[in-house]
Image (tube, grey):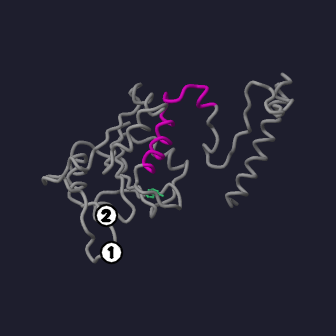
Amino acid sequence: MRIDIISAVPDSLFSPLNTSILKRAQDKKKVEIIVHNLRDYTHDKHKQIDDKPFGGGPGMLLKPEPFFECIEKLISERRYDHIIFTSPKGVLYNQKMANKLSLADNLLMVCGHYKGIDDRVREKFCTDEISIGNYVLSGGELASLVIIDSIVRLIPGVLNDSESALNDSLMDGDFVEPPYYTRPAEIAGMKVPEVLLSGNEKKIKEWKEQQSKLLTEKWKKINNLE
Ligand code: ADE
């Protein structure tokens, strides 16, 4: 998979992209992630990427021309399965969407700024407008990173066996895993449930299933699902 990201603040992306599982996925050549600095697509002395909004109002907007130039170059080079605009006005992101996006060959993420991008960029190029939650971030970069992380970990060969076994929660959107414990068996007076130390595999399996069921019910209740 190849993922391109267009951003006005590319430095905000590099640390998460070059850490942990996202780094390993790139090192293993499972994904290629390329960051494009919007400023590189300006042609004036001051490399200006924003301007005042027509019709007035507070703040500045990201200008359309650098986005147009960058996106037109990228789409002339390859076919993108999705061109995603991250915005609080978009469709709410979930695991099902992550599963679908993880099957793509090429993704392009366009990082917006709330109230801060000329809407013609979205209208002309973007196939998907995605929000990661009903709250407002300062920019689309963190949202893009959330989406990218959730996709890349699903690419076969990115997670090792133990990581993927431990991370099945919410894979199909309505199942929560039981709690897990490791050594020591007691800390601050808190003991690991006896059954997990019993060595009785049948009992342990039953306990995990029961916990999972209870936690799934609780999770649905606190999130107003069903
Ligand atoms: N940009 C600003 N807020 C956002 C959100 N909640 N989701 C996606 N992109 C955003």
Which residue is at a point 75% across and 42% down the rendered structure image?
212
Residue 12 located left or right of residue 168: left
Q: Secondary structure at mark 1?
A: loop
What is the quadrant of residue 121 in the picture?
bottom left
Image label count: 2
Residue 184 placement (x, y as % from top left): 76, 25
For the stretch drawn in magenta, the main secondary structure is helix
Real-space CA distance between mark 2 and mark 1, rounded to the nearest whole angstrom = 21 Å
Residue that extends furthest to the top in the rendered view of this protein: 199
Residue 200 lies, with reference to residue 67, above or below; the image says above
Residue that extends furthest to the bottom in the rendered view of this protein: 55
| Magenta stretch, residue numbers | 142-165
Which residue is at a point 28% across and 60% down the rendered structure image?
62
Task: Name the foreground residue: 195 vs 103.
Answer: 195
Residue 189 located left or right of residue 41: right
Which residue is at a point 49% across and 32% down the rendered structure image?
21
Check disc 1 and give the amino acid type: Gly
Ligand 1 has an atom within 8 Å of the beta carbon of the residue at disc 2:
no
Specify the label residue 123 is tagged with: 2
Residue 177 located left or right of residue 51: right
What is the quadrant of residue 114 in the picture?
bottom left
Residue 120 placement (x, y as % from top left): 28, 65
Residue 70 placement (x, y as % from top left): 23, 49
| Quarter occupied by the C terminus | bottom right
Which residue is at a point 36% across and 49% down the rendered structure image?
109
Q: Which residue is mark 1?
A: 57
Lower sequence index among marks 2 and 1 = 1
Q: Ligand 1 sits in which quadrant?
A: bottom left
Please say whether residue 162 is one of the residues in the magenta stretch.
yes
Please say whether residue 158 is one of the residues in the magenta stretch.
yes
Ligand 1 has an atom within 8 Å of the beta carbon of the residue at disc 1:
no
Check disc 2 and give the amino acid type: Glu
